[in-house]
Image (spheres, rainbow, N blue to C red):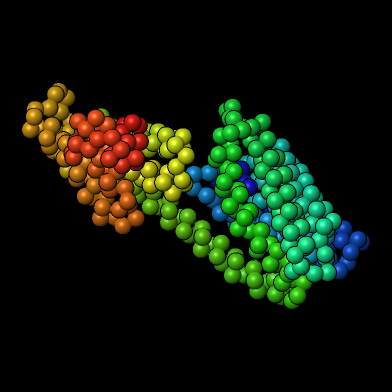
Amino acid sequence: MGTLEMPVRITKRYLLYVLSSSTLVYWVLSRLDPTAVKPTLAFLWFALLSEAFPVYLPGLAGSVSIGFIAIFASAISQGTIPGLLVAILGTVRPVDCIGKIPLRGVLYNRIQLALSALGASIVFHLWSDATDLISLPTIVSFVTAALLYFMINTVCTIWYLQRFSPRPVSVTKIVHQIGPTLFIYYLALMPLAYLVAIIFDRIGLLGVALFLLPLTIARFSFQRYIDMYQMFLGTIRALAVALEAKDRYTYGHADRVARLSVEIGKRLNLQDRDLEMLQYAAILHDIGKIGVRDEVLNKPGRYTPDEFEEMKQHPVIGARIIAGVKALERVADWIRHHHERYDGTGYPDGLQGENIPLGSRIIAVAD
């Protein structure tokens, strides 16, 4: 897993590193196992390409790549030493070569990836039947080895984040933030790594190349999806900023309510999709104030009864605006009812108790 979100910058220093690491792999394996030279170099280059163009995930200060496939496929098909070489040398990123990442972090990444690959490779080759990659014992040994890789990698990552984070952070918080993401990431890539090893065993490097090409294209497609997600969220934030320009008393209010709402949702163990929708609803909870007259919205004193009735329409207006956005239809009711009160004295519909949607109740507390 990456440590910082930075744009890709391929430097001469990084190209020199690629050349040097390739030469080192060739020199080591030509003396230990000449038959492993070409496939290991191919896996090394695929890993380097994957690390050079990772996918940055929203909500995480980090990134993921499909380099894990190259590490595990080389360890399975070529052996422990080739797997170690790909894990150590093939996971260096362009950003590691421009001085933006502390040397301590770069070296630690190499160590923890080496430990992960070494442990997983030893377990696999100790328990598996190398002559039959599709036998049940071999599959079981692969799953065990992959889970061991995940455990070592995760424990090492958590230790590093807890030890070197600028601000004190608990293990529980780190696990909650990165644990599920890392697990899903490895769960998705494990079968692909095993499939690559089988393809190499049955067809050779050409078959692996034909398999990895569409996988690489899929990676770029996924990045485009992430970019669109960020654009969508940016548009939502722009709407909130537009409202804040109209209502000078609420500058930064939407972001604060969104942040608090998501934290409350996490304490209530809401699913990631619910937290995402909660964030959208909280950012846009007051969007209906666009339909309220400026003289009412910015009135310094108390409202008259008629003015208060006009202000009470902003959740209704906001819900009507959001209901027209297909991706946000679900949160329209949350926005409509975020001024309801548990005792039924709120507005616009006087709902009470658990008749008020949970999302509305969370936003009301944060608000």
- In the rendered view, would you say 176 is above or below 125? above
Q: Nearer the viewer, residue 240 or 98?
A: 240
Res 268 quadrant in image: top left
Q: Nearer the viewer, residue 143 or 69?
A: 143
- In the rendered view, would you say 110 is above or below 52? above
Residue 177 in view here: yes
Q: Quadrant of the C terminus?
A: top left
- The image position of residue 50, as x and y in percent, is 64, 58
Q: Is residue 316 left or right of residue 182?
A: left
Q: Is residue 16 left or right of residue 353?
A: right
Res 360 quadrant in image: top left
Q: Nearer the viewer, residue 75 or 29?
A: 75
- The image position of residue 4, as x and y in percent, is 58, 43
Q: Residue at x 46, y 45 (%)?
A: 271
Q: Is residue 350 left or right of residue 169?
A: left
Q: Residue at x 83, y 65 (%)?
A: 130
Q: Residue at x 30, y 38 (%)?
A: 354
Residue 10 in view here: no
Q: Residue at x 27, y 40 (%)?
A: 355
* Numbered label tally: 0
Q: Is residue 283 left or right of residue 70?
A: left
Which residue is at the far right? 31
Res 171 quadrant in image: top right
- The image position of residue 45, as x and y in percent, is 71, 62
- The image position of residue 141, as x and y in percent, is 76, 57
